[in-house]
Image: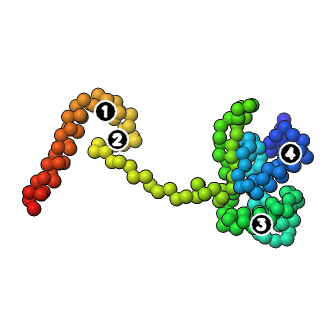
Amino acid sequence: MRHNKKFNHLGRTASHRHAMLANMAISLIMHKRITTTVAKAKALKKYVEPLLTKAKEDSTNSRRVVFSYLQNKEAIKELFGEVSQKIGDRPGGYTRIIKLGTRQGDAAQVCFIELVDFDPDMAKDTKKKSTRRSRKSAPKAEAAAPAKEEAKAEAPAEEAPAAEAPAAEEAAPAEEAKAE
């Protein structure tokens, strides 16, 4: 039985797993986005998020603790400099995993893992798309299925009033112009 064995061993020895996760964390901090398998990305997320939380407080002790995990001076400078400023007000959830599909060679599930605040495409404010309003009122969600069946049965009957509606609308502006 595997009681209380919660983390994924990734088919590696402990030393290999720690080295691999440290290297992936350094790459993530330096490049802000890396491509890997879903299993490795989930393991990396558990590994790197506590380090990002520790980096929010720039003290000698927190730098030493993070350095004990990463062992890379450039990554520490980047983490405590640019990265900690961007994630300073975020309460957690510093990384995002976006699944890409399967890899050609071995059909492994592949994904991006990225730092959330560094993706300019996701940070853009999406404006509401103006939708074209139709003349017909949309059926309510509750009665959507019966309404669709009725619409199929009444489709030929509704075509005639739809053709008359534009003519009536054109006549209304003409009458307003005469009144003026």
Foreground mark, 3 or 4? Answer: 3
Q: Secondary structure at mark 2?
A: loop
Number of numbered tags placed on the structure image: 4
Q: Could you tell whether 176 is left or right of 25 in the image? A: left
Marks 1 and 3, how far apart at CA: 61 Å
Residue 120, position in %: x, y? 60, 57
Quadrant of the frame with the N terminus: top right
Q: Earlier in the sequence, mark 2 or mark 3?
A: 3
Say if mark 2 contacts mark 3, CB within 8 Å.
Answer: no
Say if mark 2 contacts mark 1, CB within 8 Å.
Answer: yes
Q: Amino acid at mark 4?
A: Arg
**Residue 151's disc number:** 1
Residue 50 in which image quadrant: bottom right
Q: Secondary structure at mark 4?
A: helix
**Residue 139's disc number:** 2
Q: Secondary structure at mark 1?
A: helix
Q: Earlier in the sequence, mark 2 or mark 1?
A: 2
Packing grade of label 2 (10 A; few <14, some 14-19, many >=20) is few
**Residue 91's disc number:** none
Q: Earlier in the sequence, mark 4 or mark 2?
A: 4
Quadrant of the frame with the C terminus: bottom left
Residue carrying label 3: 80
Marks 2 and 1, how far apart at CA: 10 Å
Marks 3 and 4, how far apart at CA: 24 Å
